[in-house]
Amino acid sequence: MTTDTGSELQRDHQGRLRHLLTLEGLSRDELEQLLDLAQFYVRTPGDMPPRDQSLAGRTVANLFFEPSTRTRVSFELAATRLGADVVNLDLQSSSRVKGETVLDTIYTLQSMLVDVFVMRDAEPGLPAYVARHVPPHVSVLNAGEAHVSHPTQGLLDALTIRQRKGDFGSLCVAIVGDIRHSRVARSSGRALLTLGVGELRLVSPESLAADPGELEGAKRFTSLPEGIRGADVVMALRIQRERMPNADSIDGDAFNREWGITSENLGRAKPGAIVLHPGPMNRGVEITSDVADGPQSAIRLQVQNGVAVRMAVLATIVRNVQARNVEAGRRAG
Ligand code: CP
């Protein structure tokens, strides 16, 4: 299997998105259309959830071969609220633990008429690999690919920032912490750069920095006070211990003292700055509870927006596949 982010592969012959494998290669217009549709689906706690029938008759399979709370539940709710049938499979309950290959799992579910595979896996390149092996009426959505990308997280972070702070061009966004192992940093950073963010900062210890050349256009900082000074948005990232060979060598308390988003550190950002965190949080390590639960936190808003963004992505992809199917039917008939 080759490592492949799939930026070309994710479009049909007309250039429409038929998979969502990565935000690389999506235009500003495409991102804005997805955010606008997501905004249409946004509801706040206490509202009735939005419902329509964009996915009526479709079947969505959530294949989560790494742990997830937010992404998996929000994809399930999003698909259900759009009228789809939904099945959920995780590593422990699937025949992958008995040695079945991922493609055999996909072909098995395809035989049961699954139309959309939502996939999370620790192996880089898996969503694109699967996308190369499904027929044209089947879509693959990347729900978290190793350290590489997490496209719907990038979209929901952008939506949250747009709701709270407006025009991207005037904003300084600081992404702080374990950038090196973070698929969120890569997808959120890509979304923000494409949307024309005024300044994107990647703030981390040298050992947790992204490779040179990644997220070109972002400024890099190896000091937290400098990196968040004057920022409009501060995004804290969890230390991705599961992706580190030497995870035990990182002391959470020591990390918090130097790199944690505490109320004292947040005081260096612009007054009224918002705080994001993709979750799950390790309180007392990359963020303290007074910040996570404080007035500047938009963390629960991110979760709320996650359902709306996944509805927008599902509705868009399925609409595009339907358009392609109609055209193919016309050509055949
Ligand atoms: N942000 C995110 O991907 O959270 P989960 O791992 O809970 O899905």
Image (cartoon, rainbow, N blue to C red):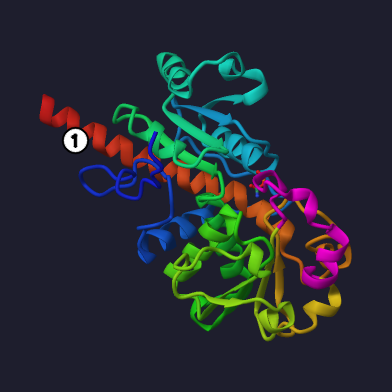
**Nearest the eye: 253 or 128:** 253
Vertical order, 225 against 85 (above or below): below
* Horizontal and vertical percent position of residue 327: 19, 35
Magenta residues span 238-261
Q: Amino acid at mark 1?
A: Glu
Residue 13: x and y, percent? 20, 43
Q: Secondary structure at mark 1?
A: helix
Please state which of residues 297 and 151 is positioned toward the viewer in this rendering: 151
The foreground one among 269 and 102 is: 102
Residue 245 belongs to the span the image colors magenta: yes
Q: Quadrant of the C terminus?
A: top left
Residue under the point 32% across and 37% down: 321
Rendered-image quadrant of the N terminus = top left
**Left or right side of 73 for 53:** left
Residue 318 location (% of width, % of height): 39, 38
Residue nearer the viewer, 192 or 112? 192
Indicate yes or no whether the magenta region holds residue 259: yes
* Residue appearing at x 70%, y 79% in the figure: 223
Whether residue 39 is visible to the viewer of this picture, yes or no, is no
- The residue shown at (63%, 26%) is 90
Residue 57, image x, y percentages: 44, 24
In the displayed structure image, the side of residue 269 where residue 65 appears, left or right: left
Quadrant of the rendered image containing residue 24:
bottom left
Q: Tell me the quarter of the picture where residue 87 sits.
A: top right
